[in-house]
Amino acid sequence: GENVEQHPSTLSVQEGDSAVIKCTYSDSASNYFPWYKQELGKRPQLIIDIRSNVGEKKDQRIAVTLNKTAKHFSLHITETQPEDSAVYFCAASPDGAGSYQLTFGKGTKLSVIP
Amino acid sequence: EAQVTQNPRYLITVTGKKLTVTCSQNMNHEYMSWYRQDPGLGLRQIYYSMNVEVTDKGDVPEGYKVSRKEKRNFPLILESPSPNQTSLYFCASSLRDRGYSPLHFGNGTRLTVT
């Protein structure tokens, strides 16, 4: 089955700096890669996703890049703010399965220091 | 309001005492799933259902049962809970549109088995 590795497990950045979280996956058939954000005590929520026919996707301060050859994808947050502090999960699923068969990474706890 | 509702939010029980965690969604979603979240392990899928009367095992199904008799409800049953099932549980639902709709998570159920 799919295996998703996520690094780092914890990340501290100064407010205004950029943060990068990286994930690698094992199954070359995976083609859907969402990112979920979980604030303390809250439910996970989708913040951005990318499919394998796209190399990069942006949404305001958040961007995701995908390298299918190397089987890795990354989340980039620019101009970080205290409200970006949360646990971020990457995930991958095989062709056609979308959200049905997501394999999640172990999560990255991001702390933005004011 | 569109939402996934789990009950109870907190549950403390003893080993071997059967329990059910309920999950209901009001978005007419075909797909529903259960995840458990443990520190350092991320989100792991327990069971999922593509539609009424259709259920399948996820990555960690041992010790759990589910049923999908109605589209809106997807209860998680622990017939004989054990301490290693102490965890934070999330129910999630999604539209069945080739799988690319986001997962909508419930608020979570924190279960402690003593």
Image (cartoon, coloured by chain):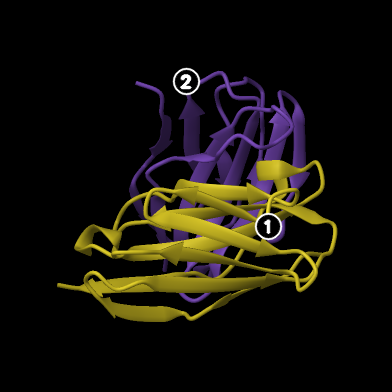
Which chain does purple denote in the image? B
Q: Is residue B74 left or right of residue A63?
A: right
Q: Is residue A35 visible?
A: yes
State which chain disc 1 sits on: A
Figure chain in yellow = A
Residue A59 located left or right of residue A81: right
- Please tell me whether mark 1 sits on a helix, a strand or a loop: strand
Q: Amino acid at mark 2?
A: Asn
**Of the numbered discs in the image, which one, if any, rests on residue A64?**
none
Element assignment for label 2: loop
Q: Residues within 10 Å of mark 1 (few under 14, many from 20)?
A: many
Screen quadrant of the C terminus of chain B: bottom left
The disc label shown at residue A92, or none? 1
Q: Residue at x 66, y 37 (%)?
A: B100
Would you name the residue on which mark 2 appears? B26
Where is residue B51? Give x, y as percent: 72, 26
